[in-house]
Structure formats: C-alpha cells, structure tokens
Image: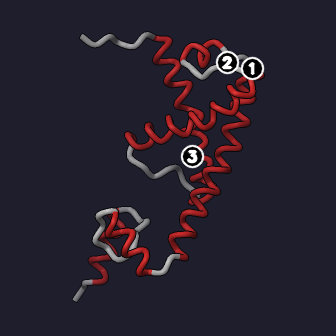
Amino acid sequence: MTDFPTTAEVFAFAVFFVPGYLSLNIGSRLVKGKNLDLPWVEKVVLSYVWSLLVFLPVFFALGLPLNAVNVNTALTTPDALLILGSVVVFGFVSGLVYYLFLRWIDILPPAWVKNIGARMGLSAEEFYFDSTAIRFLKIIWDRRT
C-alpha cells in the first residue's frame, strides 16, 4: 500500500519546485518574450531539475545538506532572499543557454541539422520552433492549389 505524502513533504515539493519554474520563465521571457512553452509534465520535471541547480549553490554557501527537512526549516528571510537572488541569476543563465542553443541551431549547416534530426528520429529536414497549429497552417498555405 502506498503512503500519502505528509503536508510537510507536499510543502517541501512546492517550495522546491517554484524557484526552478520562476527561473526558467525568466529565461524564456528574456529570449522569447513569453512564458515557457512546454507541456505541464515537462515543465514540472524540468523545473524540479532546474531548482536543484538553484538550491545547490545556496545550500552549499549556507553549509546545509539539501533535503526536504532543510528546505522546510531553513527558510528564514535572509535565506529566502538569497534563494530569490539565485533564482534571478539562474533565470539569466537559462536565458543565455537557451539563446545560445537557438543560435547554434541556426548556424549549423543544413546537412548537420538533417543528420541530428535523423539521429533523434525526426524525418524533417529542418527544425520547427512554431506551434503545431502554426506549422499546420503553413503547410496548408504552401500546398494550396
């Protein structure tokens, strides 16, 4: 039988999830001018992993191990402000990484893009960064008679 999480564990997950989510949205706003365009499951997983990157330097600087108990108990005002500063810094870092990745994809020769796509299982000759609806409308427009 599975145990339900305690209130403290749910609170620790929420507190641990939010900094990564905010940081990734800062980066997405800087590069694309809108919030992160991912399905919710991917947002949660990516935010949780990015929060690890946000919390590790803060807890290392404070000399605390990173666990659910410390996330709940060590949140005093100075620590929360340090985490907030780390969120903003890592938001700019995520924006820079995202921008450099997009520029790297643009710089690559088309043959390399095709090979990368084939290795990833994509059959298209170019990458599409638009939504599926916009891509569908473009295909209809291109194939009109």
Q: Quadrant of residue 103?
A: bottom right
Above or below for 84 versus 34: above
Q: Earlier in the sequence, mark 3 or mark 1?
A: 3
Q: Looking at numbered disc 2 in the image, what kind of residue is underneath it?
A: Leu
Q: Amino acid at mark 3?
A: Asn
Depth check, front residue: 139 or 96: 96
Q: Which residue is mark 3?
A: 25
Label pair 2/3, CB-CB below 8 angstroms:
no
Q: Which residue is mark 1?
A: 77
Q: Position of residue 73 (x, y in %)?
A: 63, 12
Q: Residues within 10 Å of mark 3 (few under 14, many from 20)?
A: many
Gap in angstroms between the C-alphas marked 3 and 1: 23 Å
Relative height, residue 85 to residue 107 (above, below): above
Residue drawn at the location 66% of the way across and 38% of the way down: 87
Residue position for label 2: 75
Q: Mark 1: give few (<14), some (14-19) or many (20+) Cα within 10 Å.
A: few
Contact, mark 2 vs mark 1 (Cβ under 8 Å): no
What is the basis of the colouring in this image? Answer: secondary structure
Q: Secondary structure at mark 1?
A: helix
For badge 1, the amino acid type reads Thr
Q: CA distance from mark 2 to mark 3?
A: 23 Å
